[in-house]
Amino acid sequence: MSPPMSEDEPIQVMGAGLSGLAAAIILAKAGREVHVHDIREDSGARFDGDFQGIENWTSDVDFLDEMREWGIDPDEFKTTSFHQVNVIHPDDVITKAWSPTVAFRVIERGTAHHTIDQGLKRQAVAAGVNLHYKSRVNPEDCQIVAAGPKDTSALAYGEIFETSHPDHVAFHFNDKLAPGAYAYLIVIDGIGLICTCLWRKQKKSTRYLNETIAWYDKHYPELDRKPIKRVGGKGDFTINRNYTVEGRHYVGEAGGLQDFMWGFGMRCAITSGVLAAKDILGECNYETEVRKRLLPTVKTSVSNRWLMNRVGDRAFKKIATSWMKDQKKRQDGLPFIGRIFRPDLFRNIVYHLAAKWMLKRVDVDDGRIIHRLPYRKALKRDVWEPSEEAIAIGEEWKRSRKGGNSESFSEEE
Ligand SMILES: Cc1cc2nc3c(=O)[nH]c(=O)nc-3n(C[C@H](O)[C@H](O)[C@H](O)COP(=O)(O)OP(=O)(O)OC[C@H]3O[C@@H](n4cnc5c(N)ncnc54)[C@H](O)[C@@H]3O)c2cc1C
């Protein structure tokens, strides 16, 4: 447990995102004085209306039930539950993965009232948390560091648009459109997002987004896409020697607690924030809980990432085909994904023999030693000529931007 703090001592949290706000809600509800500092002007300002999926496959417990048990109300923000997703194979075959249980929920990030960021912020304010935006603090002065990603291990880049298409999610295995990762389409209430994730560093990420959009325009003609804005962000994936250093708890992405394979980090971020708060309240030991509850899944994702780095479309096709076969046998597509994400002997061996060696040691200024997933170099196969349709989409976006539509993300961030 961290050095005992007097109950009157105010608690300082660095970062008013998911993990920082989750921690602050628990602490303030327990009667503690909490101050949360964020360099941005509001919670969620790191994002700009992007849709993200909260997974329900790394645990048998539904995440919203878990949040309620902790005293965090998920009804304060908008969630859209999905039992079904279109799985797009690398050869453009489209199949449906489905589950009788909720496989995941889509939420929105940003500063609008219905986003998860603002839903947590309202609960923090109601619990008495003191929020300080545009406030810069030193991590050394904080008990919880929840400042999100610092460096880049991977990027996601997307376009938000108006559409008349009904609610829908498509998960797209395609090593050309999304080098080393996946692309996706999400539509909720007439707003769509087409996004490509890049786990290899490319000279111009826009090329990949334009080509991905061109793919969707061709295969989903009913999308009727009217661009609104382009968004994106980076992911920072690290394994840390310690998660509590000199009394400071590193939570969420500031602690590298992320899914190295596909970047599903929200559940881990909120859970780690709650665990850090419980440590301060004397209810658990953060370091021990992270090692027990989160790290095994994170290390499994390191092994998955190492394996993914070794394959391309042929293996993606095999994965998609095996997924569909397994679903047919079990009449449920979720266990297949659950098995990939949850620790097992094979991935444990892969981790110790190979995967952990791809991480690069970094000695951080604040005294921590971390091992970061480097943003991999591009491969020869990542260089290709854009299609005419993709070039036209690039031009369409340029006109859209000139007309006032925003781009909240640049590769230099
Ligand atoms: C484009 C994109 C798509 C994603 N999609 C998904 C998805 O579908 N599903 C999923 O589970 N995860 C997804 N993720 C990952 C998910 O967003 C993160 O795992 C999650 O936001 C991490 O929460 P956090 O609390 O660590 O950081 P955040 O929620 O980002 O909060 C960090 C906060 O710290 C603040 N901050 C930064 N620096 C400082 C500083 N020096 N001082 C004070 N405050 C500071 C920031 O302004 C921010 O408010 C995605 C990420 C990106 C970039």
Image (spheres, grey):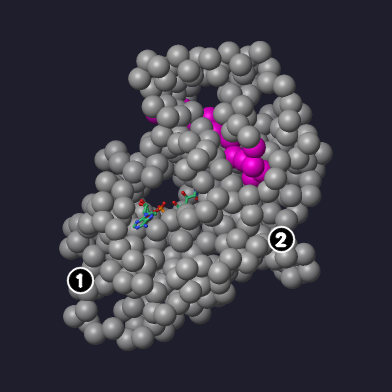
- Main secondary-structure element of the magenta-colored stretch: strand
The residue singled out by tag 1 in the image is 33
- Residue 174 rendering spot, x and y as whole percentages: 70, 34
Q: Earlier in the sequence, mark 1 or mark 2?
A: 1
**Picture quarter with the N terminus:** bottom left
Residue 218 visible within the image:
yes
Q: CA distance from mark 1 to mark 2?
A: 42 Å
Where is residue 143 shown, x and y percent of the image? Answer: 34, 73
Residue 271 x %, y %? 44, 64
**In the visual, does 365 lie left or right of 173?**
left
Residue segment shown in magenta = 187-202
Magenta-span inclusion, residue 279? no
Work out whether 105 lies above or below 275. above
Answer with the quarter of the image where residue 348 lies: bottom right
In the depicted structure, whether residue 232 falls above or below residue 24: above
Q: Residue at x 78, y 36 (%)?
A: 380
Q: In this figure, which residue is indicated by the disc labeled 2?
A: 358
Name the one closer to the observer, 198 or 368.
368
Which amino acid type is shown beneath numbered disc 1? Glu
Is residue 329 in view from this perspective? no
For residue 309, above or below residue 6: above
